[in-house]
Image: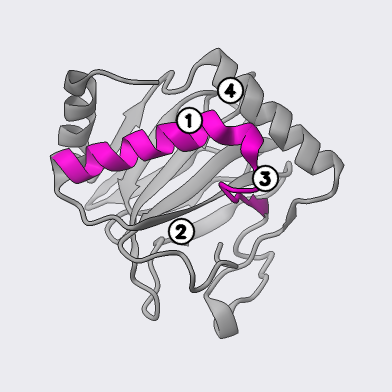
Amino acid sequence: MNYSEEQWLNWMDQLSENDYVVVDDFISDEMFNGIMGFFQEMESADKLKKAGIGTQQDYQVKAEIRGDFIYWLDEDRDLALKTFFELKDELIQSLKRFCYLSLSGSEFHIAKYPAGSYYHRHLDQFNERTNRQITVLIYLNKHWKPGNGGELVIYKEDQEILVEPVAKRLLLFKSDVIEHEVLTTQVPRYSLTGWLLHQPAGIGFLLG
């Protein structure tokens, strides 16, 4: 995308100050269509699997906590998403430059929440695995409207901040600081979700 230095600096300042930042129309229509085409291909091929919680030996599928289906991305395998991975690299470089973060890896998946599903309040950090630094969400719901549900609630001090999952919107937040939940969705809800890591993603690739 090659955003300007001024744009990146503004977003990184907001992230540093507020622990999260929302950017509308972060991806182009062309990238959106490419991601959704890939998503539909993976869904048709039955590649999306029930997501769980925890790491390695503690990994469990608990439908009462979260109800999404995911497909883990691989930069070397999923070449159809090359432009997204390039944008991810641009984001990482900006975080390193403007936020002085030591990032050395990432992990991403596509996620579908069927109607009626949700993800209860949680933190994207684990006692036994603390390398997630920044959570990245790109929403893919082109026709989302109020009443469809699936909003993400950020819990920050005494605030509850509602983020609507509208198409092409980026949400970044600090993984070890921001507690959040996904409210029950009334329609299928799509996103591309990931984490930027202090350590490589080699451990716990089955994480939710």
Q: Which label number is shown at residue 32?
A: 4
- Separation (CA) of disc 4 from disc 2: 28 Å
Write the residue at 39% across / 75% down. Answer: 129
Image x and y of residue 75, in percent: 56, 47
Which of labels 1 and 4 is toward the front? 4
Name the residue furthest top: 29
Q: Disc 3 designates what residue?
A: 113
Magenta part of the protein: which range? 70-97
Residue 133, by quadrant, is bottom left
Q: Disc 2 designates what residue?
A: 121
Whether residue 50 is situated above or below residue 33 in the rendered picture = below
- Give, as a three-letter code, the residue at label 3: Tyr
- Separation (CA) of disc 3 from disc 4: 18 Å
Judging depth in this view, the residue of 23 and 39 nearest the camera is 39
Image x and y of residue 17, in percent: 14, 41
- SS class of the residue under badge 2? strand
- Give, as a three-letter code, the residue at label 4: Phe
